[in-house]
Each structure stands twice: as structure tokens, then as C-alpha cells.
């Protein structure tokens, strides 16, 4: 009888502590959680997408002398040259894909190597986040990112051994492990500290920093290229400094956040539901509420005592994982979060990391071909101006739908709900990609029409499934499996990203219509799979997981 009384008392204490968190006003501690998590996501996106602009520079410096040969003919329009102009890395962009053995696939691997690491990191950190605790794992992923960012920026070819491309891909893989670990950790910590009313907004704001990271990547390239323009015009090998500066800049946001991540407290939900210490969780909730009214995002409490088991709680062993997800009502949610993320990332990464086709269509990938003696050729270029133009084009794409879409989702995710935003996003993206596929031969010649359709699709990627597939897995699983569930869902997304980049991306330029049609079909299946997930807006994490009876003795 006393055990029943104790269990009832402890369960009531747990419910009261969580109610205080769920009903708390939006305050400074919430802002701190969003900023600390968001700065990491800024670094994540910066590191993932900056490689798309760095690789052409690497190819130019390391493979230009080997693959560029011949000369430009006499009488090029605009130049009216009376003699042939020798082709050099200073005036000709190297065609890496057509010259390097299996060039398109090597290019795709270099772009996808980070995603392979992401997949490993998401599962690994997801499981350990549930086993060891959010606090013990948070910050480690940033340390991995810092070390591997420095390694990426400083790597070079061996005198007798691996090339710069092989070594860069290795560093990028391990960088991806750190980035991957950030997904479940940041999502779960933000979700478990959030109140019910603004939980979706807080998670969306963390994820929206991905858009800022993409945008800043473009700005860093533009700024560096502008500052070193005269040097590059005198010697194209100065590009070797540009890409290293751009990759190395990724440590700045990571360094800014690492201390705050290492000192963030354990979430009260983990303290109760996994460790079984209701007293510690109750006191931690009181401290969170107190710090919520302190006008500082750097505040934390000192002397954080270690939580110890006071009551018996449900286990998070592998057997318990199988038992929980062995029930269809739970498995369907995991399938829903995993497949929708998979479907999204096939097209999102397939398009985002293969943007040369898009840049060509909006005239930001070098000069148009001209006719010389009846033959179409690409005229000589100023290599500094060419890469500056590409950087500007990438920034235009970031501003044209991508960045605004993230923040529209932050503004409306609570008002409209997660599922309506995800349904409508998949629907609009499917229509846009289908239109591009059906009208490709005509629309690729019409810059304005193409840019309108492409911008609409980019906007609804972010004001749609790219954000909601991150948000929902942080809400729907019980505390003991929340980090693992989010990690598995995110890893399935990266499987989609790898397919989009490596299996489909190499064929985009020559088979754009087919690739876009495939992307449209996959987007439609993602919209259909949204039916499997619940609407999470306005519900507590305990209501969503259906686990109110965590304390068993």
C-alpha cells in the first residue's frame, strides 16, 4: 500500500513539475535555449552547404593545370582578338566532371560525405542522448565540428599518397558526425525546456538558423573574393586561400556556442523519466522559472548536483524500445517521421548541392556561349569575376524564398499547426517540380518564369516539410526514446539526401526533366506519409507520447 502511495505521490510531483514547464511564460531561459541551439544549427548549415562553392575553387587550383589545354580561336565576339588566346586556369574554368575519372560521382561523393557522417552522428548521438543524458552529450558534437572544420580548412594532398579530395572527404565525413549529433540533441533539449504554447515556434526558430547559415556562407565567399580580387586576377592559385578561409569560418559560431552547451543543465523530463529523481527535477524546474525572468541569455545555475534514482521508472533498454515501437500506434508515428524526412531530403539536397544548373539558367555561372565560325564556345573569363558571380548567384537563391520561408514557418507554425503546413508544403513543391519537369525544354529558356517557379518551391520547402520534419520528431516520442526517435528520423532524411546527391545528382544536368519528375513523385509520397504523424500543436509532450505512467514503483 505504501508503494502505491509513494508511486501516486511521485507521479503527482512529476505532473506538477511538468505542468509548470508547460504553462510557463515565454522568457529569457527559453530565449537562451533557442540561441544556444540555434547558433549550432547556424554552424551546421554553414558547414554543410559551403562545400558547394568551395569545390569548384579546389578543382580550379588543383586540377586546372592538368585538365585545361588548347587555345581560344581568333575573332571571339567582344574581344575581336587577332591571335589565338592560350587557355589557362587564369582564363578558363576547369571541367572537372568530364575530365576526372568518374568525375560526376567523385563530385557527388565530396558533397555527400558530410551527409554520410550526419547519418552516423544522428543515430549515435540520438541513442547516447537517451542513455547518458542530454547534458552529457551536448557540446561534444560542437567540439567534433571545430576540430574537423580546422582539419578540412588545412588539408592538402600528400606528396605520395591521397589527394586533397580524398583527405577533404575524410575530414568532411567526421565533420558530418558532429553535425549529425546536433540534430537530436538540439531538438530534444529545446522541446523539453519549452512551454506548450510556443514549443513549435522555438523548435522552428532553432531550425531557421539553418537559413542564416546558408546566407552567411554566401556572404563570406563574396566578401573574401571581393577583398582578394586583384590578387586572384594576378594569380588564380590565390583561390586556394579563399576556399580555406570560407571553410575555416565555420568554427566561429561553433566556438561561440560551445561553452554554453557544455554548461546547459539536464532537462527535468530526462531527470524524472529516465533517471527517476523527482526531487531534483522539481528543484530544476523552479530554477528554470527563476532564470526565465532574469534578463540575460548567459545565466546558469552553479553547483549543479548529480541526479540519482529515487523511484523506479520505465526502462529505455533495446528490449523496451522494441516493445514500445512493436505497437502499431507507435511504429506508425516513427515510420511517418522517418519517411517524410527521407522524401523531403531527396529533393532538397539533390537541388541545393547541385545548383550549377540553376545558376546557368539565371546567368550566374559564367558568360553565355558565343558563336565563332559557326561553333558555339564559352569565351575566356576573368576567373576572379567568375567565382564572384557564382557566389552572388548562390546568395540570390538563398534570399529568393529560402531564408524567408524559414521565418514564415516560425511565425505560423503554432497558428496553422504542423500537419497543415507540411501537407501544403509537399503539395506546392510537388506541383512546382512537376511544372518544371513538364515544361523544362521551354522554361529553361525563360529566366523569369523559371525563377518564379523555383523561388516558390524554395519558399515552401522551408515554410513546409524542411522545418516540420525537424519539429515533429522532437515532440511525438516519449522522453526515454525521444532522442533516439529523432536521431533515427533525421538519419532516414540523410539517406534521402545521399540518394538525391549521389544517385540522382550526377545525372541532373543531362536529364533534368527526368530528375525533376522523380523528385515530384517522391514529394507526393512524402505528402501522403504525413497522414501517419499526429498534430502536435497545443498538446503536452506527455499527451503526445501517451506515457503518463512512467513511474512504476
Image (cartoon, rainbow, N blue to C red):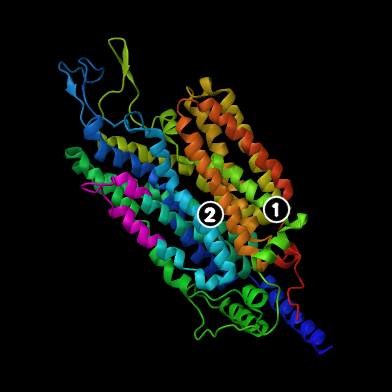
User: Is residue 106 found left or right of 73 in the rendered image?
Assistant: right
Q: Is residue 413 visible?
A: yes
Residue located farthest toward the left when viewing the structure as drawn:
83
Residue displayed at 55% across by 84% down = 306
Asked if residue 154 lies in the magenta stretch, the reply is yes
* Callout 1: SS: loop
Could you say where residue 422 lies in the image, as x and y percent from the top left? 66, 46
Residue displayed at 49% across by 53% down = 118
Asked if residue 406 lies in the magenta stretch, the reply is no
Residue nearest the observer in this picture, 470 or 498: 498
User: Is residue 289 found left or right of 218 in the rendered image?
Assistant: right
Residue displayed at 56% across by 78% down = 291
Residue nearest the observer in this picture, 159 or 90: 159
Residue located farthest toward the right when viewing the structure as drawn:
1
Could you say where residue 540 lies in the image, as x and y percent from the top left? 72, 66
Could you say where residue 204 lies in the image, as x and y percent from the top left? 58, 56
Can you identify the residue that label 1 sits on? 417
- Magenta stretch in the rendered image: 145-169
Chief secondary structure of the magenta span?
Answer: helix
* Callout 2: SS: helix
Q: CA distance from mark 1 to mark 2?
A: 17 Å
Could you say where residue 267 lies in the image, as x and y percent from the top left? 59, 73
Category of crowding for the residue at label 1, using alpha-carbon neighbours closer than 10 angstroms: few (below 14), some (14–19), many (at least 20): some
> Above or below — where is 313 with respect to 143?
below
Residue nearest the observer in this picture, 483 or 18: 483
Q: Could you tell which of marks 1 and 2 lies nearer the N-terminus?
A: 2
Can you identify the residue that label 2 sits on? 208
Total marks in image: 2
Q: Are marks 1 and 2 in contact (CB under 8 Å)?
A: no
Position of the N terminus, as image quadrant, is: bottom right
Amino acid at each position: 500500500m505504501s508503494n502505491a502511495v509513494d508511486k501516486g505521490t511521485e507521479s503527482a510531483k512529476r505532473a506538477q513539475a511538468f505542468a509548470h514547464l508547460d504553462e510557463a511564460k515565454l522568457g529569457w531561459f527559453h530565449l537562451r535555449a533557442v540561441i544556444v541551439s540555434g547558433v549550432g544549427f547556424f554552424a551546421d548549415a554553414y558547414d554543410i552547404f559551403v562545400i558547394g562553392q568551395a569545390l569548384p575553387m579546389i578543382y580550379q587550383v588543383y586540377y586546372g593545370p592538368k585538365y585545361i589545354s588548347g587555345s581560344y580561336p581568333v575573332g571571339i565576339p567582344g574581344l575581336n582578338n587577332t591571335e589565338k588566346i592560350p587557355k589557362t586556369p587564369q582564363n578558363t574554368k576547369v571541367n572537372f566532371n568530364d575530365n576526372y575519372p568518374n568525375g560526376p560521382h567523385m563530385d557527388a561523393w565530396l558533397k555527400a560525405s558530410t551527409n554520410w557522417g550526419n547519418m552516423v552522428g544522428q543515430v549515435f548521438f540520438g541513442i547516447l542522448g537517451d542513455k547518458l543524458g542530454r547534458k552529457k552529450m551536448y557540446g561534444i558534437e560542437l567540439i567534433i565540428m571545430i576540430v574537423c572544420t580546422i582539419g578540412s580548412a588545412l588539408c592538402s594532398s600528400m606528396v605520395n599518397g591521397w589527394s586533397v579530395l580524398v583527405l577533404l572527404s575524410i575530414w568532411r565525413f567526421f565533420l558530418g558526425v558532429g553535425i549529425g549529433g546536433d540534430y537530436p540533441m538540439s531538438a530534444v533539449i529545446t522541446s523539453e525546456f519549452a512551454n506548450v504554447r510556443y514549443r513549435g515556434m522555438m523548435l522552428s526558430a532553432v531550425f531557421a538558423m539553418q537559413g542564416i547559415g546558408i546566407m552567411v556562407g554566401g556572404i563570406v565567399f563574396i566578401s573574401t573574393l571581393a577583398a582578394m580580387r586583384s590578387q586572384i586576377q594576378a594569380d588564380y592559385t590565390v583561390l586556394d586561400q579563399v576556399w580555406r578561409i570560407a571553410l575555416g569560418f565555420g568554427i566561429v559560431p561553433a566556438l561561440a556556442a560551445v561553452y554554453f552547451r557544455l554548461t546547459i543543465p539536464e532537462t527535468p523530463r530526462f531527470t524524472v523519466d529516465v533517471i527517476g529523481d523527482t526531487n531534483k527535477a522539481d528543484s530544476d524546474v523552479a530554477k528554470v522559472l527563476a532564470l526565465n525572468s532574469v534578463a540575460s541569455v548567459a545565466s546558469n545555475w552553479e553547483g549543479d548536483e548529480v541526479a540519482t534514482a529515487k523511484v523506479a521508472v520505465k526502462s529505455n533498454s533495446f528490449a523496451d524500445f522494441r516493445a514500445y515501437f512493436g505497437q502499431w500506434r507507435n511504429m506508425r508515428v516513427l515510420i511517418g517521421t522517418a519517411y517524410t524526412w527521407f522524401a523531403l531530403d531527396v529533393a532538397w539536397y539533390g537541388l541545393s548541392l547541385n545548383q550549377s544548373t540553376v545558376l546557368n539558367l539565371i546567368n550566374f555561372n559564367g558568360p553565355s556561349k558565343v558563336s565563332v565560325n559557326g561553333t558555339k564556345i564559352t569565351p575566356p573569363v576573368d576567373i576572379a569575376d567568375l567565382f564572384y558571380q557564382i557566389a552572388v548567384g548562390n546568395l540570390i537563391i538563398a534570399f529568393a524564398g529560402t531564408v524567408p520561408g524559414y521565418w514564415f514557418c516560425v511565425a505560423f507554425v503554432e497558428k496553422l499547426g504542423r500537419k497543415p503546413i507540411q501537407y501544403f508544403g509537399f503539395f506546392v513543391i510537388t506541383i512546382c517540380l512537376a511544372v518544371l519537369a513538364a515544361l523544362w525544354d521551354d522554361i529553361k529558356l525563360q529566366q523569369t518564369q523559371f525563377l518564379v517557379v523555383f523561388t516558390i518551391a524554395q519558399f515552401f520547402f522551408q515554410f513546409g516539410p524542411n522545418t516540420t520534419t525537424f519539429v515533429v520528431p522532437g515532440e511525438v516520442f516519449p522522453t526515454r526514446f525521444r532522442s533516439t526517435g529523432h536521431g533515427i528520423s533525421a538519419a532516414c532524411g540523410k539517406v534521402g539526401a545521399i540518394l538525391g546527391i549521389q544517385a540522382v545528382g550526377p545525372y541532373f544536368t543531362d536529364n533534368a526533366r527526368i530528375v525533376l519528375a522523380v523528385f515530384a513523385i517522391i514529394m507526393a509520397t512524402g505528402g501522403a506519409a504525413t497522414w501517419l504523424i499526429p498534430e502536435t500543436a497545443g498538446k503536452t509532450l506527455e499527451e503526445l507520447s501517451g506515457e503518463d505512467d512512467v513511474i512504476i514503483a
